Amino acid sequence: MAISLPVDLPANLKSMQPYLEMATDYESKDPCISYWCRLYVLKQGFILKRVEDDLSFLLVLMEVLGKNKQDLQSKIETTDIPVARAHLEGVVQKLLSWAENVPPLESLTKPRVWFILYTILIIAVLLLRHFSLLECC
């Protein structure tokens, strides 16, 4: 049975919603990106000033991540930090390349805005010391 996250995010964690949406979008395309985004949300959930309502959500998220980690154990992008970093950087590069090559008349289309947002979110996952915190895991 698949574990799913609660639909309603605790108010204290609303800023993490875009990362969870991206994780859901990438679930079938690139499960490794999905895994790292959810793990980022979990780490940030413990760093942010938390309230009791957050705990139940974070526990379910931990269960989801545990199952994901088992499912993705054969993928080196989830088990080796330098490889994972390179994989995320490659995805950022592809997204930026796509955004740069879109004709100017289509510059404000919804897909382009989403690609740019996803690029920013992945960069945030890479830059906010996320991977240095994970080396112990």
Image (cartoon, rainbow, N blue to C red):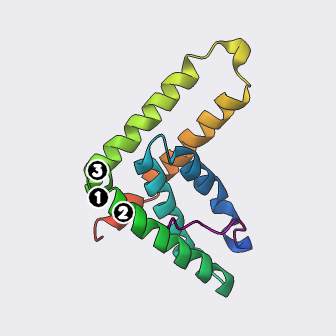
Note whether 123 is above or below 62 in the view shown: above
* Magenta-colored span: 1-9
Mark 1 touching mark 3, by CB under 8 A? yes
Residue 107 picture quarter: top right
Residue 23 image position (x, y, % from top left): 54, 52
Quarter the C terminus occupies: bottom left
Q: Is residue 49 visible?
A: no
On residue 69, the disc is 2
Cα separation, mark 1 vs mark 3, equals 5 Å
- Tell me what residue is drawn at x 68 percent, y 14 percent: 104
Q: Is residue 56 left or right of residue 122?
A: right
Which residue position holds label 1?
Answer: 73
The answer to whether 39 appears left or right of 51 in the picture is left
From the viewer's side, name the closer residue of 98 and 65.
65
Between discs 2 and 3, the one toward the N terminus: 2
Write the residue at 60% across / 35% down.
Answer: 116
Q: Residue at x 46, y 63 (%)?
A: 39
Q: Which mark is residue 75?
A: 3
- Within the image, what quadrant is residue 68 found in? bottom left
Residue visible at 26% across and 53% down in the picture: 74
Measure the C-alpha gap from mark 1 to mark 2.
6 Å
Residue 44 on image: x %, y %:
53, 68
Where disc 3 sits, the SS reads loop
